Image (cartoon, rainbow, N blue to C red):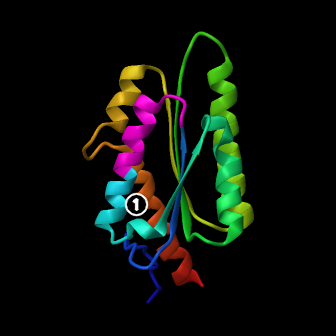
Amino acid sequence: MPRDLTGTVDGRGLRIGIVTARFNAFVTEGLLAGARRRLAEAGVRDDDIVIVRVPGAFEIPLAARALAAAGNVDAVVCLGAVIRGDTPHFDYVSRAVTDGTRQVMLELRVPLGFGVLTTNTVEQAVERSAEGPANKGAEAAATALEMVSVLRQIG
């Protein structure tokens, strides 16, 4: 019978970093609240969470890398909001934060929960950052915890 490795969303004893962008704070603060709520539900103590605030989404990968490389966290939750505008800036920032986050995760082998919204409208961003089951900050936190569990099972 094959061995089936499935992660759990159990944060007891884990240390979690959260990197959140200050730009579009009306969205990112909701993502942060959702992530913190989900981590608390999973048993992560407030004392085991470090929150790093960066200017915008573009800066998230660097701060996430610094947190992960320091070895003081088991996972990092990345939170930001890039909302489409009238210029190609959206495309450049979205690609940079996505590629940068993936690179950090693969190089350092530390789980990164990706809660960076890339939406077409402000309304979409607000909807995904509101309190409730659709909050993408909470989803990113749960994903980070589950990946810690999976990686530990793999060994």
Residue farthest to the front? Answer: 47
Quadrant that contains the N terminus: bottom left
Residue 111 lies in the magenta-colored region: no
Q: In the picture provided, is 13 more to the left or to the right than 153? A: left
- Tell whether position 25 is magenta: yes
Q: In this view, does 97 lie above or below 147?
A: above
Residue 153 image offset from top left, x and y in percent:
52, 83
**Image vertical order of residue 95 relative to residue 44, above or below:** above
Q: Which amino acid does label 1 sit on?
A: Ala
Horizontally, is 23 left or right of 107 in the view? left
What type of secondary structure mainly makes up the magenta span? helix
Residue drawn at (59%, 9%) of the image: 86
For the record, the magenta segment spans 22-34
**Which residue is nearer to you in this view: 90 or 21?**
21
The picture quadrant where one finds residue 90 is top right
Judged left or right of residue 90, residue 114 is: left
Give the residue furthest to the left: 132
Element assignment for label 1: helix
Residue occupying image coordinates x 44% and y 69%: 47
At 27% across and 42% down in the image, what residue appears? 131
User: Dot 1 corresponds to which residue?
Assistant: 142
Q: Position of residue 120 (x, y in %)?
A: 48, 21
